[in-house]
Image: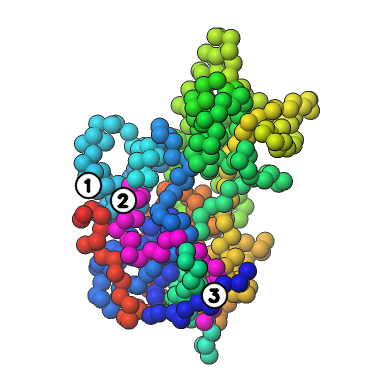
Amino acid sequence: MSYPAPARPGPVLDVVGVGFGPSNLALAIAIAEHNAGVTPGEQLAARFVERQPRFGWHRGMLLEDATMQVSYLKDLVTLRNPGSPFSFLSYLHSRERLVDFINYGSAFPTRLEFHDYLEWAAAGFGEQVDYDAEVVEIEPVRDGAGVRLLDVVTRRADGRAVRQRARNVVLATGLTPRLPRGVTLSDRIWHNCELLHKVPGVAGTTPERIAVVGAGQSAAESVDYLHRSFPTAEVCAVFARYGYSPADDSSFANRIFDPAAVDDFYTAPDEVKQQIMGYHANTNYSVVDPELIDGLYRRHYHERVAGRERLRFLNVTRVADVVEIDDRVELAVESMIDGEREVLTSDVVVYATGYRATDPLWLLGDLAGSCGRDAVGRLDIRRDYRIATTADVTAGIYVQGATEHTHGITSTLLSNIAVRSGEIVASIAGTTAPAAAAPARAALADAPAAR
């Protein structure tokens, strides 16, 4: 695919952030707070590029009564700077809901409210973000000393190609929906990330059966939501486990999400890293909040008592085949115990099969060959989230998200986002000469708390 020749770059920036979800939003805040505490000549100039037309975070799963699985204190800033005007408490105060939230009596806000908090924080950086813009490549700027600068080439909504030159890039390209091999999404075969976007398309019909494949929190939430939204439809939950497994939210287990746990994980031998992930996978992966498990079980039991079982659980079962035919989907499910097959004729099939980290290097072209790898081919990422590179590349390439193999379970989660952003800013500020020609525009006076 060819693009128009990009315009010449403007002043050299200290940072270009690729993606503007929660991770790089936290980075923008950390840069603004850094700039507020240093002289103008030490400030960092930053811009961000986001493919979406506006800020958004998992909009397709913003179910009305779904709650966060992380405390509001693990917001964008509090663990790094409790006095920050970008905290969740500052947000509540600005919305005149602080007392009401205290009376609410829970550390876990709804997902809708937390998303509103993120939008509120993002609004303070509108002038620093190019929305509806897609990064198409990152090119090295070579000189006699090697690669000290990088050009981030962006395609804008109007078709223009724009080049931004920077000393450092921070790649936070998010997660990609994971689907079983051979599955193609359509109007009747969805990934759960599209749930709220897709439901209106069938809301005017009367679906007879909907199948949800998966055993984690999103799968259980999808089953619950669809069962309530379509009161005459049969909703089938298909998963390989015997039943939903509860998330371990106990106090000691939650220490795996502490900032100090990142240091422990990073320095641990590979075999210990694998053990830690195995021991504590049930804090995050393919597990469900116990309250939701209990609610679904009770609803299923009450239906059995009433003799009208709309909620079905096909456990210890795998999907053998899925075929879309005209206005229906034929889902062949196979018992993992005796191999018996059943074909479910469904109006919709929802795959709640999780996500995978996006390849952080796909934009780098030949420069990816200068990035270090470990013995099994994974990226060599330093403690400060900077990718190790060959000696001739002194431009900084930082990664947020695709670091689980080096930094542990919090890499794709909100739990450590405040501390991580501060560590990246400290690294950049310590290794990068300031861009005096383009001083940073964001300052604390522009924070949403001051609106």
Residue 94 is marked as 1
Q: Secondary structure at mark 1?
A: helix
Q: Secondary structure at mark 3?
A: loop
Q: Secondary structure at mark 2?
A: helix
Q: How many angstroms separate mark 3 from mark 2 (CA)? A: 35 Å
Establish if 95 lies above or below 29. Answer: above
Kindly indicate whether the residue at mark 1 contacts the one at mark 2 (C-beta within 8 angstroms): yes
In the rendered image, which residue does mark 3 sit on? 4
Extreme-top residue of the structure: 306
Q: How many angstroms separate mark 2 from mark 1 (CA)? A: 10 Å
The magenta stretch is: 117-141
Name the residue located 58 percent from the left edge and 42 percent from the top edge: 191
Closer to the camera, 361 or 48? Answer: 48
Quadrant in which residue 405 is drawn: bottom right
Which image quarter holds the C terminus? bottom left
Closer to the camera, 330 or 449? Answer: 330
Q: Amino acid at mark 1?
A: Ser
Residue 48, position as x, y percentages in the image: 41, 65
Q: Magenta span has 64?
A: no
Tell me if 112 is positioned left or right of 214 in this view: left
Establish if 170 lies above or below 404. Answer: below
Name the residue located 47 percent from the left edge and 75 percent from the top edge: 163
For mark 1, does the 10 Å Cα neighbourhood hold few (<14), some (14 to 19), or many (20 or more) residues? some
Closer to the camera, 227 or 254? Answer: 227
